[in-house]
Image (tube, coloured by chain):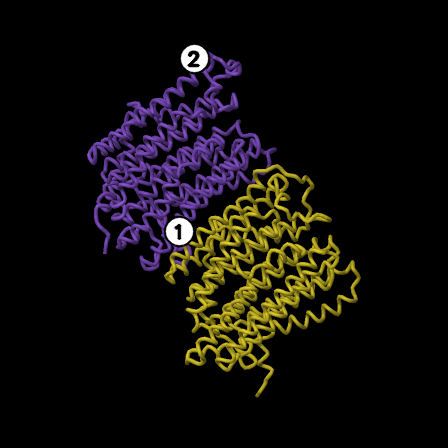
Chain colours: A yellow, B purple
């Protein structure tokens, strides 16, 4: 096989990230604790560099590398840009939290970058094994990050659960892939797709394999009934890590689903559609109902994530470009909302105080009207109330579902979002209607306040003008699939 | 600037400016700024009436700009004779609410004023929107300020009331959203409400759409049996919140019937009219009786609102011009009267901090001017001729007589029940001996209160004596609506 350096061009962002990551790992060992900020700045600069490389290396038509194992298309570029942004926001939000807890170490930044690399590989995968490699790189980094606070029993337990369940899911995914390989004779997504169109393989082993693939996927997304790890991990992990898990990986998980189900196995659409319907309905039901019973914000947001993943699946199962674009929009918006939500929790946390109980939000409007207003926007956005952008995310998904002729599913979805509205409203109630329990002033560095304000106002601004971002998602899907 | 964008954005931007004045140290500034914004909001709405062409049913002051290209959603505004009066009513009420809250609201003044101003802009948007998504955005966003108003400045049980209000109304509107999306595909990727009016739809689909719209609007109106959120919300809301709820937001539901249910699904509307009529008559008769036994004045007026709104929906589903115009007149008149009554209760509550009828008695001895105003509004609420309350009720009863005598008969019981619960309350509060020593210390209304109640009294009497300016602008649009609803849309 011929190989030329030009083949590596589409991988430039990944190569740059890896190179910088190695550099940061080495340099960090030579820094004193007081100089640790350098690592932080370098990490942010790395992300900025990646963003520039991705942006300038953008081609309208998909570019393949390594005989198609790696693909760089518009879908990948848009998702990667969103990914850098999400990771950068997460780094800004978490700095003071990490400093206060003695977690402000090089490892955190190295693991973050490793996870980012894993997600980038997932997003650009053109082959089952590339997908799997990216997924494992992400997962292993996350397991370690959850356990970063090694003296915390809760965090260690969460990491163990995450690891064991994650390993099972990976095993299921691999098993499903092997069944597909057995039926079609290839692991290349495009070849599998062609083979299936030509009628390769028997239906039974294919669908059997599909079941395992979908189950593995559901594990990673945190869809019911494979959601057990989500609340415990969200709760147990340091809030900064929870923030990370709940935002950027959802973008990768969306790409993962699209690559597997749409680019690889679209011929089996009718089969996986029914599975996804079940997963989506159960996720919306369990997620929204269980969230009501939570007293801890992190657990509540964990269940809220589950229900949002249910909504995300709705767009994919609609099986149209419209639907995929709607899901993509949803995943980007969800990452944005989740960042802001956990960002507010980080804002309220301080030395020796986690601020992760719902009661800690009481009377926030009196302590800091601006923070309360931002959280209000985020909560209404998660509930899907206009004029926030969460409404348009839901609208576009519902539109795709109705277009696919599944009006009943749209009705089920809106009824569950009604139930969901209750616990988001409760957060608003705590902030605005109740008297504060804490009177300590809120201290946060300026960059974090600024980032949070941008994050919160973006929810409103995108809600007033959602058109451009929706358009970008549609173009990305149309030109890549 | 086009007038409809002005009536939407002037109050909203004004509200944001008020919000920016920050905490209560700047309360006087916030008040004055809010007054200026509300006054401006009212002034910019006047050209809608003066420049209105009453001879045509076509939408006027139209504005059209693409908004969300991907879904073909447009920023499309326009009013006809049905929606225009409500924009004026809303802008007018907002001005009163700002004045009414002047001294009464002492905590978080800026946020209170801002909430009402923003809500006012959003409600104007509801009445002006001609694009379904735009309508929905305004329709739902106005829940947010109202939720906060009830929850932050409300009474002891405010949290329960705020949640009930929000979730109830959200339930209805979410199904309407699905209906809009369905219509979007039926109409060939369009969210234009006027396109939906022309769309041919099969009977089953019409019935399902009717149910979806009905839930959204019946909750808002509210109709029996989905009315239970209203008494709770009214009792707990601060005076300004009650006024806006009764005078404006209830009208949004009734307006929805005229703009969506009847023209989009006329066949189902005819088919299911018996259902709406039954619920309306239950509201008129049964809720009237419920109002009779209330011990809390605000609750009594809340139930009275439900009964009066029953009249509105009854008039609409008679499908004749008199009924629909009667319903519309009743809506405007009820906006004045219920607003005025809630303000009256607010005046008493500010002095005695009680809304219980039994805590009062003999008010006429201490507050004669107030008692006179209260008398006028109580009479108007019971439908006394020469007040605006009479005009609408009379028109609706007339139109019901044409359709079915018994409809008219049951509807006419309101003249008895309405008089009974309103005047009995009035008697117990205002007349008799002063039994509560605190009533002894009550001061009569001040200039600010006199101004508000005086203006409303002029409106109530003016509309009762000469309703023509109100009905004239409606004629063409109502006639067109009747003609439209008369045609079958079955494919």
Position of residue B343 in the picture relative to residue B24 (left or right): left
Q: Is any atom of residue B331 visible in this view? A: no
Q: Which mark is residue B177?
A: 1
Residue, disc 2: B432
In the rendered view, does B375 fall on the left or right side of B28?
Answer: left
Return the residue nearer the eye: B238 or B168.
B168
- Measured along the vertical axis of the image, is residue A142 above or below residue A154? below
Determine the residue positioned at 54% across, 77% down: A178
Rendered residue at 68%/59% (across/down): A157
Chain bearing tag 2 is: B
Q: Residues within 10 Å of mark 2 (few under 14, many from 20)?
A: some
Q: Is residue B184 above or below residue B253?
A: below
Circle 2/circle 1 CB separation < 8 Å:
no
**Label 2 or label 1, whichever comes before in sequence order:** 1
Where residue B390 appears, x then y in whole percent?
29, 26
Q: Secondary structure at mark 2?
A: loop
Can you name the residue that lies furthest to the bottom here?
A: A1
Nearer the observer: mark 2 or 1; the answer is 2
């Amino acid at each position: 096989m011929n190989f030329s350096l030009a083949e590596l061009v589409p991988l430039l962002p990944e190569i740059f990230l890896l190179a910088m990551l190695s550099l940061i790992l080495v340099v960090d060992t030579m820094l004193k604790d007081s100089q640790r900020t350098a690592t932080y700045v370098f990490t942010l600069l790395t992300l900025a560099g990646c963003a520039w490389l991705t942006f300038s290396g953008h081609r309208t038509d998909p570019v393949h590398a390594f005989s198609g194992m790696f693909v760089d298309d518009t879908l990948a570029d848009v998702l990667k840009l969103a990914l850098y942004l999400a990771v950068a926001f997460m780094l800004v939000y978490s700095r003071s939290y990490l400093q206060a807890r003695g977690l402000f170490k090089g490892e955190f930044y190295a693991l973050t970058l490793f996870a980012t690399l894993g997600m980038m590989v997932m997003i650009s995968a053109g082959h089952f094994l590339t997908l799997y490699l990216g997924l494992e790189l992400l997962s292993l980094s996350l397991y370690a990050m959850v356990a970063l606070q090694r003296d915390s029993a809760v965090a260690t337990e969460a990491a163990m659960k995450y690891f064991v369940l994650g390993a099972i899911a990976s095993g299921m995914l691999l098993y499903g892939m092997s069944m597909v390989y057995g039926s079609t004779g290839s692991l290349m997504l495009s070849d599998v797709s062609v083979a299936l169109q030509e009628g390769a393989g028997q239906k039974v082993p294919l669908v059997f394999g599909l079941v395992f693939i979908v189950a593995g996927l559901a594990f990673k997304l945190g869809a019911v009934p494979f959601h057990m790890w989500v609340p415990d991990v969200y709760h147990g992990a340091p809030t900064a890590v929870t923030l990370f898990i709940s935002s950027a990986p959802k973008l990768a998980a969306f790409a993962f689903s699209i690559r597997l189900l749409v680019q690889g196995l679209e011929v089996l659409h009718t089969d996986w559609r029914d599975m996804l319907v079940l997963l989506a309905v159960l996720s919306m039901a369990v997620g929204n109902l269980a969230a009501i019973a939570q007293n801890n914000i992190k657990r509540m947001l964990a269940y809220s994530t589950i229900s949002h993943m249910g909504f995300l699946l709705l767009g994919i199962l609609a099986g149209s470009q419209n639907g995929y674009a709607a899901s993509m929009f949803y995943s980007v918006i969800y990452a944005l909302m989740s960042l802001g939500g956990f960002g507010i929790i980080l804002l309220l946390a301080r030395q020796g105080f986690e601020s992760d109980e719902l009661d800690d939000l009481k009377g926030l409007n009196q302590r800091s009207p601006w923070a309360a207003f931002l959280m209000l926007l985020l909560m209404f956005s998660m509930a899907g109330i206009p004029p926030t952008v969460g409404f348009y995310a839901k609208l576009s998904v519902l539109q795709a579902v109705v277009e696919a002729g599944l009006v009943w599913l749209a009705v089920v979805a809106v009824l569950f979002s009604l139930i969901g509205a209750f616990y988001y409203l409760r957060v608003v109630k705590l902030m605005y209607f109740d008297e504060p329990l804490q009177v300590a002033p809120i201290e946060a560095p300026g960059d974090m306040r600024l980032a949070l304000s941008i994050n919160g106002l973006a929810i409103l601004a995108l809600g007033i003008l959602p058109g451009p971002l929706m358009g970008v998602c549609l173009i990305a899907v149309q030109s890549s699939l | 600037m086009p007038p409809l964008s002005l009536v939407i954005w002037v109050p909203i931007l004004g509200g944001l400016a008020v919000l920016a004045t920050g905490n209560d140290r700047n309360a006087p500034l916030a008040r004055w700024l809010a007054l200026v914004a509300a006054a401006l909001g009212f002034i910019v709405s006047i050209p809608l009436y003066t420049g209105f062409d009453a001879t045509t049913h076509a939408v006027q002051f139209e504005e059209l700009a693409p908004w969300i290209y991907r879904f073909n959603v447009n920023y499309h505004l326009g009013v006809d004779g049905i929606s225009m009066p409500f924009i004026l009513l809303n802008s007018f009420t907002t001005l009163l609410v700002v004045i009414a809250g002047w001294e009464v609201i002492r905590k978080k003044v800026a946020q209170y004023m801002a909430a009402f101003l923003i809500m006012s802009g959003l409600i104007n948007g509801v009445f002006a929107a001609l694009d379904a998504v735009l309508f929905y955005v305004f329709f739902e966003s106005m829940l947010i300020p109202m939720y906060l108003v009830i929850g932050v400045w409300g009474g002891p049980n405010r949290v329960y009331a705020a949640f009930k209000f929000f979730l109830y109304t959200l339930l209805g509107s979410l199904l309407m959203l699905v209906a809009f999306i369905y219509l979007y595909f039926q109409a060939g990727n369009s969210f234009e409400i006027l396109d939906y009016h022309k769309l041919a739809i099969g009977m089953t689909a019409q019935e399902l759409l009717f149910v979806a719209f009905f839930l959204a609007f019946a909750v808002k109106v509210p109709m029996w049996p989905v009315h239970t959120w209203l008494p709770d919300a009214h009792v707990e809301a601060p005076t300004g919140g009650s006024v806006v709820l009764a005078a404006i937001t209830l009208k949004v539901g009734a307006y929805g019937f005229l703009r969506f249910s009847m023209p989009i699904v006329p066949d189902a509307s005819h088919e299911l009219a018996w259902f709406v009529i039954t619920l309306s008559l239950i509201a008129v008769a049964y809720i009237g009786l419920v109002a009779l036994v209330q011990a809390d004045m605000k609750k009594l007026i809340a139930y009275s609102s439900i009964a009066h709104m029953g009249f509105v929906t009854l008039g609409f589903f008679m499908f004749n011009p008199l009924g629909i115009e009667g319903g519309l007149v009743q809506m405007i008149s009820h906006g004045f009267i219920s607003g005025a009554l809630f303000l009256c209760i607010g005046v008493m509550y500010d002095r005695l901090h009680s809304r219980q009828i039994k805590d009062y008695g003999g008010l006429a001895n201490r507050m004669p001017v107030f008692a006179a105003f209260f008398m006028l509004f109580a009479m108007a609420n019971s439908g006394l001729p020469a007040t605006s309350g009479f005009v609408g009720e009379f028109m609706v009863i007339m139109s019901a007589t044409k359709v079915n005598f018994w409809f008219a008969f049951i509807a006419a019981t309101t003249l008895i029940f309405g008089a009974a619960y309103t005047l009995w309350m009035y008697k117990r509060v205002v007349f008799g001996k002063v039994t509560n020593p605190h009533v002894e210390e009550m001061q009569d209304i001040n200039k600010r209160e006199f101004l508000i109640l005086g203006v409303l009294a002029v409106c109530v009497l003016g509309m009762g004596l000469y309703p023509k300016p109100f009905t004239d602008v409606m004629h063409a649009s109502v006639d067109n609506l009747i003609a439209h609803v008369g045609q079958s849309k079955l494919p």
